[in-house]
Image: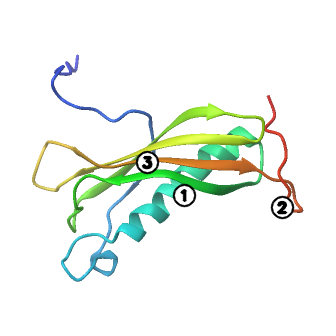
Amino acid sequence: MDVKEDNQPTPDGELALKLIPNRSDTNAHGDICGGWVVAHMDHAAESVASRIAHGRIANVALESVVFLSPIRIGAAVCFYTKLLDIGSSSIRIGIEVWTQNPNEKARRKVVDAIFVYVAIDESGRIRKVPR
């Protein structure tokens, strides 16, 4: 049985995406670009929102995005999503990004965010989220 220590932080949510960025994803300082991270957070969260909405959705807000630590090349980047709220047409998704460097056991949280999506129809008009 795997025992979890109370003092070890763990991701909140379900693993939605895991990637290992490469050198083309870095900035001039060798860290992974924030835009790369945000784009993949959107991919992870929109898959959850689309499933809940039973179809097409659109990202209408990045309610918050907090970068806590740089991501180094070679780290496994894991995107965890958690449903926060469902409105009549909107869906709020919490996203945590965690990394694990190749030579370390410990994981660390590097980004915390909330994205908001709305359900849309085929014409791009806002529609109700099915219940």
Disc nearest the viewer among 2 and 1:
2
State the residue at coordinates (44%, 34%). 13
Q: Is residue 70 left or right of residue 105?
A: right
- Separation (CA) of disc 2 from disc 1: 19 Å
| Kind of residue indicated by mark 1 | His
Check disc 1: other Cα within 10 Å, few if <14, some if 14-19, many if 20+. Answer: some
Q: Earlier in the sequence, mark 1 or mark 3?
A: 1
Check disc 2: other Cα within 10 Å, few if <14, some if 14-19, many if 20+. Answer: few
| Kind of residue indicated by mark 3 | Ala
Disc nearest the viewer among 1 and 3:
3
88 over 59 or under it: above or below: above
- Separation (CA) of disc 1 from disc 3: 13 Å
State the residue at coordinates (77%, 41%). 89
Q: To which residue does mark 3 refer?
A: 113
| Kind of residue indicated by mark 2 | Gly
Which mark, by number, is residue 43? 1
46 over 26 or under it: above or below: above
Question: SS class of the residue under badge 1?
Answer: helix
Tag 2 near tag 3, CB within 8 Å: no
Check disc 3: other Cα within 10 Å, few if <14, some if 14-19, many if 20+. Answer: some
Question: SS class of the residue under badge 3?
Answer: strand
Q: Earlier in the sequence, mark 2 or mark 1?
A: 1
- Separation (CA) of disc 2 from disc 3: 25 Å
Q: Position of residue 26 (x, y in %)?
A: 28, 76
State the residue at coordinates (18%, 78%). 29
Q: Position of residue 52 (x, y in %)?
A: 69, 38
Tag 1 near tag 3, CB within 8 Å: no
Q: Position of residue 18 (x, y in %)?
A: 39, 53
State the residue at coordinates (32%, 63%). 20
Q: To which residue does mark 2 refer?
A: 124
